[in-house]
Image (cartoon, rainbow, N blue to C red):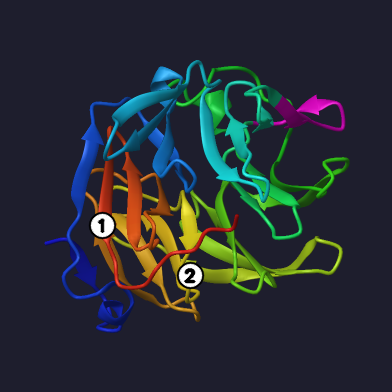
């Protein structure tokens, strides 16, 4: 069994014959998958081993960057530059064409950020990222060290990289985030609270009117972590047992089951119909009916 059906409408979204298969295994703690459409490869972080890796059918698993400063979530900007969150340094960095790293964010009001975790870039170039404390309190995904901030928030970096703003600070542990298709709403999940909130995006890039969009329920291991949206606006979020698929109104249609506790996901392949999933020690994939969506 590869799916848990909670509403038969799930078949209209993902198809009736979904099969989850293992792509690669033997890693420490996989996270932050992103599809490189130029090189046609999947990039992800093996946080426990401080190692960013890549995979393609032709080349198999290779090293992308090591050390990686315990990199977590990553995405590409419109210029094709990889932007990543680093747990080990509390930074958001951008990889330039020559391979050098530019630091985009590291402090809030002279205090180090907690541990930037996941990231999304709006079509205007503004960068939004979550900043929970996992990279300071868990040795497997970070470096143990004291906290300097007394809150866990979500931030926005202006399109020109000149201005860092705190846009919300009332989360227990903010984690995955994604925009609606029209970018008028921003979804942010909260791992301990096991729910997804949605906010209205204002004209200045700030967010307002936060409310609960959906909850990830179930008895299997897993909680809200990575989150993405497909080309028709369905929200996919990690949760108990696998990847939870939500309708536009927040109703959960069902779960794509993963053999290990899921951590994140990314759309890939030329038609964007392959959902790649990071789950503890392995990478998995499944072919779905509805294509995903890249924002770069």
Q: Are marks 1 and 2 in contact (CB under 8 Å)?
A: no
Q: Residue at x 62, y 31 (%)?
A: 115
Find disc 1 in the rendering and name its residue: 286
Q: Quadrant of the C terminus?
A: bottom right
Between discs 1 and 2, the one toward the N terminus: 2
Q: Between marks 1 and 2, how big is the CA–CA gap?
A: 23 Å
Inspect this view and state whether residue 178 appears. yes
Q: Residue at x 40, y 19 (%)?
A: 49
**Residue 96 position (above or below residue 274):** above
Left/right of residue 196 with respect to residue 99 in the rendered view:
left
Give the camera-side residue of 122 and 72: 122
**Residue 123 position (above or below residue 285):** below
Q: Mark 1 or 2, which is nearer the eye?
A: 1
Give the camera-side residue of 112 and 230: 230
The stretch of residues the image draws in magenta is 102-114
Find disc 2 in the rendering and name its residue: 214
* Element on which disc 1 rests: strand
Give the camera-side residue of 93 and 106: 93
Q: Residue at x 54, y 18 (%)?
A: 143
């Amino acid at each position: 069994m590869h799916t848990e059906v909670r509403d038969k409408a799930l078949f209209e979204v993902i198809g009736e014959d979904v099969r989850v298969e293992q792509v690669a295994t033997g890693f420490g703690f996989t996270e932050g998958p992103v599809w490189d459409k130029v090189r046609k490869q999947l990039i992800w972080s093996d946080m426990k081993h401080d190692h960013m890796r890549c995979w393609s059918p032709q080349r198999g698993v290779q090293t992308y960057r090591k050390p990686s400063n315990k990199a977590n979530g990553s995405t590409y900007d419109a210029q094709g530059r990889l932007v990543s969150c680093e747990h080990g340094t509390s930074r958001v960095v951008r990889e330039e064409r020559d391979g050098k790293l530019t630091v985009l964010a590291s402090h809030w009001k002279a205090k180090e950020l907690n541990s930037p975790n996941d990231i999304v870039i709006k079509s205007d170039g503004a960068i939004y990222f979550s900043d929970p404390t996992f990279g300071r309190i868990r040795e497997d995904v970070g470096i143990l060290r004291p906290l300097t901030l007394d809150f866990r928030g979500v931030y926005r970096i202006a399109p020109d990289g000149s201005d860092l703003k705190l846009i919300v600070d009332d989360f227990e542990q903010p984690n995955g985030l994604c925009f609606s298709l029209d970018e008028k709403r921003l979804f942010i999940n909260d791992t301990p609270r096991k729910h997804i909130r949605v906010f209205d995006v204002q004209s200045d890039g700030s967010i307002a009117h936060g409310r609960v969009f959906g909850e990830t329920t179930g008895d299997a291991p897993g909680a809200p972590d990575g989150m993405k949206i497909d080309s028709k606006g369905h929200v996919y979020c990690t949760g108990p047992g696998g990847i939870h698929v939500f309708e536009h109104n927040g109703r959960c249609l069902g779960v794509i089951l993963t053999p290990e506790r899921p951590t994140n996901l990314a759309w890939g392949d030329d038609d964007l119909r392959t959902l790649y999933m990071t789950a503890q020690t392995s990478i998995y994939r499944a072919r779905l009916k509805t294509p995903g969506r890249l924002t770069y």
